[in-house]
Amino acid sequence: RKRVLSGIKPSGELNIGGYGGALHQFVNMQNEGYDCYFFVPDLHAITVPQDPKLLFQRSKSVAAYYIAAGIDPKKATIFIQSHVAAHAELGWLLETQAHFGELGRMTQFKEKSGGKESFSSALFTYPVLMAADILVHQATHVPVGDDQKQHLELTRDLAVRFNHRFGTTFKVPDPIIQPIGSRIMGLDDPAKKMSKSNPNRNSYVLLEDRPDEIRKKISRAVTDSEGTVRYDWEAKPEVSNLIEIYAVFSGESVAAIERRYEGIGYGPFKQDIADAVIAKLAPMQSRFNDIVESEELLSILRDGARKAAESAASTLLKAKQAMGLLSLN
Ligand code: TYM
């Protein structure tokens, strides 16, 4: 069976970019019958400084958002990365195979380290742990946003390199990057990825935003002076970004959206986008509030950790044996 694995870091409040590129795809793939593993990569979050109390809370929040968005713990395995030691353990084994040079070429690393020397060494090896997350579960499909493409290429390279050196051990996974929604840009500037780290609060919509905030932010989104709702990233990046957001939240095609707003200006278009976003987020928020502090969530995570540990054990052992590490069984 095809196996899906992916995760969202608990490093800040989730925004609709992560929903478009990741979460909404997670739900679709689960419903298409894939064998799904969705986890909270807390070990990746701590590669940059985190407030321990916030991290603790956010790990629960991400897991609760998975469920609130429609991931069914009876169908998918939901777990916290640090609860399954095999991830970090395989991460170390793979670090022995990853090259210093190739890690230095990762654009996310270059952005996050920002030319300084005081970043953590884990920020540098971050993509190797990500490869371990994927390979330890023999995932075949990894749904991600466009910004993770390079990390997925490295994952594939490491799998192929390891298999070549030590014998076939890992499946070589395919990234799943949707044409629409995998690159949601800031509402203030379509050249920058929508991100919680933007100091301008109006540049992003959070999954936790209230309806009036969502309306306000979308009504303030930058557009152009042409006044036609047309999908064209070259000529109309602002409007194209809004069309993608609308397509993700309404489930409609880009062509259907273009047709509906022919001869109509941006005002009604923006109101309808806000309505579509609110229609998805409001029920999600109420489910989130019901589960985030529940005993049920902890029990789902306990179950998930057990299942994920079982899934990872045989691959980890195989990798160790392939490398010649002494094993006693
Ligand atoms: P993270 O936590 O930064 O983002 C989670 C997912 O959301 C996508 N995403 C976006 N998609 C579209 N538009 C945006 N503006 C936007 N912002 C974020 C990301 O591409 C990602 O898919 N390294 C990963 C976490 C990770 C992981 C893994 C993912 C760790 N191990 C194994 C898959 C498999 C990350 O930092 O994602």
Image (cartoon, rainbow, N blue to C red):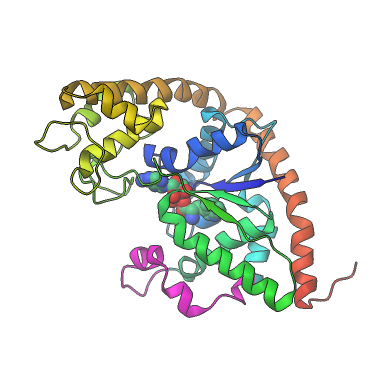
| Foreground of the two, 29 or 80 | 29
Residue 270 horizontal side relative to residue 69, left or right: left
151 left or right of 232?
A: right
Residue 208 screen position, x and y as percent: 39, 30
Tell me if residue 136 comes above or below residue 303 in the rendering: below
Residue 292: x percent and y percent?
Answer: 54, 30
Range drawn in magenta: 94-119
* 320 is higher (above) or lower (below) than 218: below
Say whether residue 34 is visible.
yes
Q: Position of residue 83 (x, y in %)?
A: 66, 50
- Residue depicted at x 47% and y 48%: 177
Q: Residue at x 69, y 55 (%)?
A: 138
Left or right, 89 with reference to 288: right
Look at 61% across and 57% down and name the residue there.
Answer: 173
Q: Quadrant of the N terminus?
A: top right
Q: Quadrant of residue 246?
A: top left
Residue 49, magenta (yes or no)? no
> Split into 4 quadrants, where in the image is the C terminus?
bottom right
Using the image, determine if residue 99 lies above or below residue 286. Answer: below
Task: Give x and y (percent) for residue 160.
Answer: 63, 70
